[in-house]
Amino acid sequence: MSLLNRIQKGGGSGSSSGGGDDDPLKSTSDLGGSEESSRLSAMRSRPTAVAGRATGRGPDSGYIDLKTRVQNRLLSELDQSMDLTRKTEVRSHIEELFNAILAEESMVLARAERQRLFEQIVAEILGFGPLEPLLADESVTEIMVNGPKNIFIERKGNITRANVAFEDDDHVLRILDRIVAPLGRRVDESSPLVDARLPDGSRVNAVIRPVSLVGPTITIRKFFKKPLTVEDLIRFGSVTKEISEFLRACIISRLNLIVSGGTGSGKTTLLNVLSGFIPNDERIVTIENAAELQLRQEHVVTLESRPPNIEGKGMITIQDLVVNSLRMRPDRIVVGECRSGEALDMLQAMNTGHDGSLTTLHSNSPRDTIARLEVMCLMAGMDLPQRAIREQIASAVDCICHQERLRDGSRKVVKITEVQGMEGDMITMSDIFEYEQTGVEGGKIVGRIRPTGIRPKFTDRIEAAGIYLPPSVFGVGRTY
């Protein structure tokens, strides 16, 4: 059987979005045991249908028809036993067949068009189709697919339309299936939402019909191939040298820290940088929905939650993983994001000897972070009085680092707040650093994050760890 037929037939007879054998979305249990099998299944296409739809569809229809015909011939003539994970060899073999097919069919193309056609076909076979050039562009930080024809990208905090497009909904679904299948995840009408990741760790969220009315929607949060360092954040203006010294001292002295902020504010990036301050001789357990943290220490255990299978069983939640991590002898627990009842277990861990834990949380301010923590603890299903929850929070959380994405697209730490304790029924907090906007120049927000002059109460814990921060870090003796 040719590789083309294998790709068209896919595997198994499990549940799918359309119910037929040629459906581009299959249950993961039908994809075969090996990663190569998943890869091939994710490449299922409908060449005849695509070619037919291309006719009369606009000025690009002839190009699409040519691309489809060459691609179909390539797939039919490729060695069906070829290992698609050996990309360099496969690419070289595809190029030989590609040149032979063009010569055999007497297709005359300009060099630029020829190269464009070849790269698009290789992307369809080995990569992620039209998304491939966007993924390769390091200046693109986010990719947003709103249906097959509307693709937007973010560069330097600004969103613009990309000059690429998919052929139709089926084309988007084939690429999406290629992303989620190797991870053991599925997306179909019964499970139209999925969180996944790319091989480089970039975060992927997808929503398909019937939930998404505009067609398959994919959001990719790209991460730098080389993890950012604190020096990079200082250069970008996200933090200052004084703040980096303070946060480093907090991590080494094993303070429990929450990174808060809105969507796209850079919480995960900051958490990555902060985790780099953890000493290399400590055992770190990371817990995430889709593993995306890029810790560089040697002793790291990465745990990832799991959605239910096609039968609705086997789900492993973040809360389950937090509870289990307490039995894994961790020195540090790093939770990618607290969203629900796992917040209570995280607080319990912080209060039972697992100091130095880190997590992120969506909120609008440090005070809102405390309020959200209270709500999420109630979501754990425990009938706890409000005061008991607040006492847990006040005892567990030492510091909140709040980050925002400003109107000009820049991402900055705007507040670092100490959680001091309880006064009556209220949790008392004190700002150690705060951002002050001084104006706008050329569309860019101008400002500075400055110390408030208050020394945190946990300074003695920092000094007990052998770290002595100069008074100038907290603004003592400095003039502005």
Image: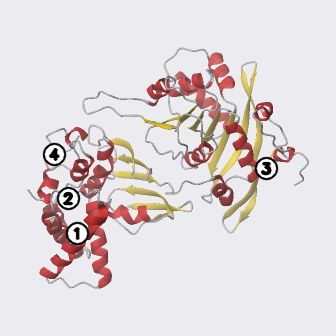
- Say left or right for 81 vs 274: left
| x and y, in percent, of residue 9 in the image | 13, 51
Q: CA–CA distance between discs 1 and 3?
A: 58 Å
Which residue carries the number 4 mark?
A: 11
Which disc is residue 93 wearing?
1
Q: Is residue 166 visible?
A: no
Which residue carries the number 3 mark?
A: 450
Q: Secondary structure at mark 4?
A: loop
Dot 1 or dot 3, earlier in sequence: 1
- Nearer the observer: mark 1 or 3; the answer is 1
Q: Residues within 10 Å of mark 1 (few under 14, many from 20)?
A: some
* 1 and 2 marks in contact (CB < 8 Å): yes
- Nearer the observer: mark 4 or 1; the answer is 1
Please give the name of the residue rendered at 64% of the width and 21% of the height, measured from the top-left corner.
392
Which residue carries the number 2 mark?
A: 82
| x and y, in percent, of residue 374 in the image | 60, 25
- Nearer the observer: mark 2 or 4; the answer is 2
Q: CA–CA distance between discs 2 and 4?
A: 18 Å
Dot 3 or dot 4, earlier in sequence: 4
Q: Secondary structure at mark 3?
A: strand
Q: Label 3 is placed on what type of residue?
A: Arg
Dot 2 or dot 4, earlier in sequence: 4
